Image (tube, rainbow, N blue to C red):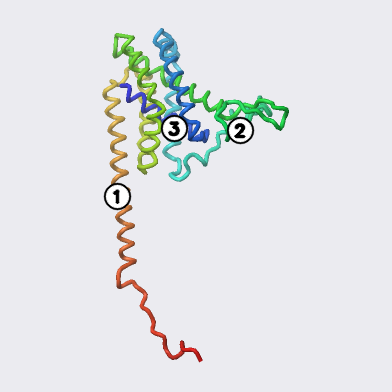
Amino acid sequence: LEMTFMIENLFVFGMLVRAFRLPERLTPKTLTIVAWAQILFMMVFFMGMAAWLRSLWFLPYLLGAWLMVCGIWTLLEREDSHGEDFDIMETPVARKFKDCLGDRFLPGYDNDSDSFFIEDKAQDSRLKMSLLVPALCVLLLADFLLEIDAVLAKISEFPNAYIAFSSSAFAAVAIPEMFFVAQGLVHHFSLFKYGIAMVLMFFGGEMIVSSTFGKDMPPLTACGWVVGILVLSLAASVVRDGLSVGARSTSGRLDDSPGNETPSRTPGRDDRLP
């Protein structure tokens, strides 16, 4: 159960990290803050806030539609773009945020430090907010919304709140390390991103359907579907990459075969020096 919800969080975090073009050196620090904030969110949710938020009828539909959009965006993303074809600072919300802060906002990251606020020595040492602050806020908001259904599922499955909370807390600590494991799978297996897209759309569709008909899918069934989709995408990637390597090696052998060698020409009378 914890692995199912962690996979959902990791894939959404990966999409947001690519959208904000967060440097690799700043990603562990940011995700560590998100992990500790997730433990705090779960503590508040287990005290009863999750049931109150779940009573808002529009929230599951909004979150489910957002997950499906994330899946479609991941599905349509070019393999060689790595999120570079999307600039989040060109979105209407980002432009409004930039207009409100004016020159106090720096749409980038500090190359010399990993601080959230940068001192601009060229303008009387004024502090400017870097892009790391809105990136962290969006990650925290996404984690907050995703944890609502996770906590409710844990409460329904485990009557002991201490066991439910402690297991979720231990899983949250592993988020920074598991994030890079997931990103490594994306880079090494060419079709794994399509599995990620299908999992995100599966979670979004399941959330909308369960809210409409009032019946949730059993956690073990959902975990089986997620594992099956990811294993299938990994297997398809191995087959595709193996066929590509075989085709390239066959083409190389054909180019180096004796029949395709260019015959050497013996110098004739016309090639001699006068």
Dot 2 falls on a residue whose secondary structure is: loop
Q: Distance between the residues labelled 3 and 1?
A: 27 Å
Q: Residue at x 37, y 27 (%)?
A: 203
| Left or right, residue 221 beside residue 182 | left
Nearest the viewer among 172 and 219 is: 172
Q: What is the spatial separation of the Cα atoms under label 1 and label 2, in whole angstroms?
A: 42 Å
Does residue 182 appear in this view?
yes
Callout 3: SS: helix
First along the sequence among labels 3 and 1:
3
Badge 1 crowding class, 10 Å Cα cut-off, few under 14, some 14 to 19, many 20 or more, is few
**Mark 2 crowdedness (10 Å alpha carbons): few <14, some 14-19, many ≥20:** some
Q: Where is residue 223 in the image (x, y as percent from the top left)?
A: 29, 26
- The image quarter containing residue 72 is top left
Q: Which residue is drawn at 72% across and 30% down?
A: 123
| Residue holding disc 3 | 14
Image quadrant holding the N terminus, namely top left
Q: Residue at x 36, y 42 (%)?
A: 188
The x, y position of residue 186, in whole percent, is 38, 39
Q: Which mark is residue 107?
A: 2
- For badge 2, the amino acid type reads Pro
Give the answer, above or below, for where 125 lies relative to 51: below
Q: In which quarter of the image is residue 191?
A: top left
Residue 96's disc number: none
Q: What residue type is labelled 1?
A: Gly
Q: Which residue is disc 1 drawn over?
A: 242
